[in-house]
Image: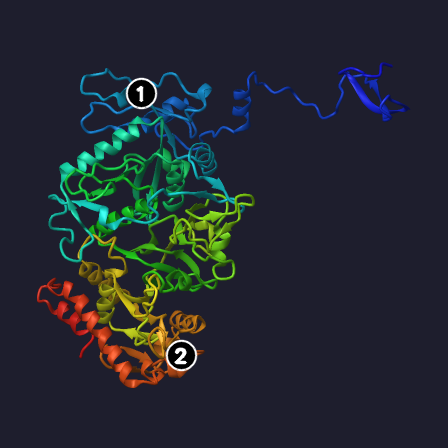
Amino acid sequence: MAENGNANGEFSFGTGTARNGLAKIQTHKKQNGICHDDSGPPVKAQTIDELHSLQKKRSAPTTPIKDSQGAFATVSDEDRQKQQLQSISASLASLTRETGPKVVKGDPARKAETPKHVPDHHFTPAFNVSDSSLKFTHILYNLSPAELYEQAIKHEQGSFITATGALATLSGAKTGRAPRDKRVVRDETTENDLWWGKGSPNIEMDEHTFLVNRERAVDYLNSLDKVFVNDQFLNWDPQNKIRVRIVSARAYHSLFMHNMCIRPTPEELENFGTPDFTIYNAGQFPCNRYTHYMTSSTSIDINLGRREMVILGTQYAGEMKKGLFSVMHYLMPKRQILSLHSGCNMGKDGDVALFFGLSGTGKTTLSTDHNRYLIGDDEHCWSENGVSNIEGGCYAKCIDLSREKEPDIWNAIKFGTVLENVVFDEHTREVDYSDKSVTENTRASYPIEYIPNAKIPCVGPHPKNVILLACDAFGVLPPVSKLSLAQTMYHFISGYTALVAGTEEGVKEPQATFSACFGAAFIMLHPTKYAAMLAEKMQKQGATGWLVNTGWSGGRYGSGSRIKLPYTRKIIDAIHSGSLLEANYKKTEVFGLEIPTEVEGVPTEILDPVNTWSDKKAYQDTLLKLAGLFKNNFETFTSYKIGKDNKLTEEILAAGPNF
């Protein structure tokens, strides 16, 4: 038989030797003419594009269509998308233009898959229609994480897959929020509702200026070949969920919001309807600095009357998350629902605890408890039904993250997670969480179900305990105090913590920080309104308020030492179990705080801070200094009266330090 055989032969090694010294290859023709037994039917593809289309399994609709004959009627993709695309097209229409862009669903890179014609999106060019309306804008609608990975890696510089499967990305020049560039439209809707003036985070702008920025953002988005659109929900309470639409130019932003908002089911998506609130994120494009009210090339603008938000000049994704949180701080109280910047967890017996605290107080660490279910880490609502998480994900700090300290967060950084501004090894793609080369504010965004003990759906009964955390670097607040309702309101409005100014060499003096309602940057109404709602709900549900100091004891920073985390955990455990309610209490001077005489597992001497200071005069001086800082801070709120006869205002003021 011929030495080289043919395509229909079967290969085997013969006994002879070929010229190169290797065994000859013999071929033996099989009777059925097939060379291998692993053959299958031929692939029905003429081109590589067709082959790729076969590689990706097409998602068939599986949800009922309203007014259709049969539960799962078959309709064409074009008909199915018609209403959805019209809605998005309306979102993208600029105010002074008669029409929005022609919209086509799909990836513009896939030329073969791009439909040449979309019904019901005709328009007649007119003189007042901009050039951006004469082109196709591809809508990449509610893409999956895998599709968004592809878009980011192909088209966004600085996007990489890390060793654990997370998507590492860069937010550009801005690596944190820009609160001074945030604006809220002051109009008939907000004039009398919102908190304006001294101490308020709400910097006003007028309707006209908002529309100038809105048109700039929308025109930029319309000029692109493609935009990403997310339709999602806020608030796990089914009676009070909010529909949001996010229009953005980056896959990174789309994946971030996919993680942070509540992901709709296919059926919910088909019946989504008109969004309650829309974000236009044109962050790559600056605002015009000469526009009225602008102080830089960045502007984050909220218009509550139009239910819209515009982002220009910053690509930091946290602006979208916190912008929506601000909106919820306005919409929810209108429904008598309290919006809260807090962590929340639930015990096996259904006892819920809220954790308030500014950065560095231990809010994330203490609300993450393997013996309890996590309802959420940051944003919640308290309604007549109980508590509910606003978000569908977590946005965790990553600086100095380790498997030992935060195993849940460490393990959540996998496929689907967005890692912002981290540094990683060029070859292995292992992330160095201690590296601050890009920023100290490195972050991970992941769906809440990535946390093993997350409670899905993220709702729970009414809270039993409201825990206010403070890291007191002055060292004069007790490790734990039981608060009256008036004291809870006072300390909730104050939102105190004190940290060490470690950024400047030689500065060892503690820095007091006050942030109203433990989230002043995001609240819309006057802080006393949220405090009054909190007190009302606590009183109705019989919840107890606690002030827990996770900071220093035995002296201020530099002379004392930080309260050990195991002791704080024992205190939190005693709050959860209810045993701390049964303890004996005594009252401290100046602040008038009720402190327990003993807590199981905690040294008795540290429960009253005066015992831990060797220099009693220094303790007294420091205590009075902190009390003065509280009083000065609270002056901002004293002019605001609560209750018809102002009794409530007087009660709150009396609950503060007395000296």
Q: Residues within 10 Å of mark 1 (few under 14, many from 20)?
A: some
Specify whether 635 is left or right of 268. Answer: left
Q: Quadrant of residue 320?
A: top left
Q: Nearer the viewer, residue 631 or 33?
A: 631
Q: Residues within 10 Å of mark 2 (few under 14, many from 20)?
A: some
* Of callouts 2 and 1, the N-terminal one: 1
Residue 538 position in % (x across, y down): 26, 65
Classify mark 2: helix, strand or loop.
Answer: loop
Which image quarter is the C terminus in?
A: bottom left
Q: Quadrant of residue 344?
A: bottom left
Classify mark 1: helix, strand or loop.
Answer: loop
Specify whether 189 is left or right of 595. Answer: left
Where is mark 2, residue-wise?
Answer: 599
Kind of residue at disc 1: Lys
Above or below, 356 against 89 in this view is below
Nearer to us of marks 2 and 1 is 1
Above or below, 596 against 524 in this view is below
Kind of residue at disc 2: Val
Q: Quadrant of residue 207?
A: top left
Residue in view at x 16 percent, y 38 percent: 209
Specify whether 49 is left or right of 296. Answer: right
Gap between marks 2 and 1, in whole Å?
69 Å
Q: Is residue 263 visible?
A: no
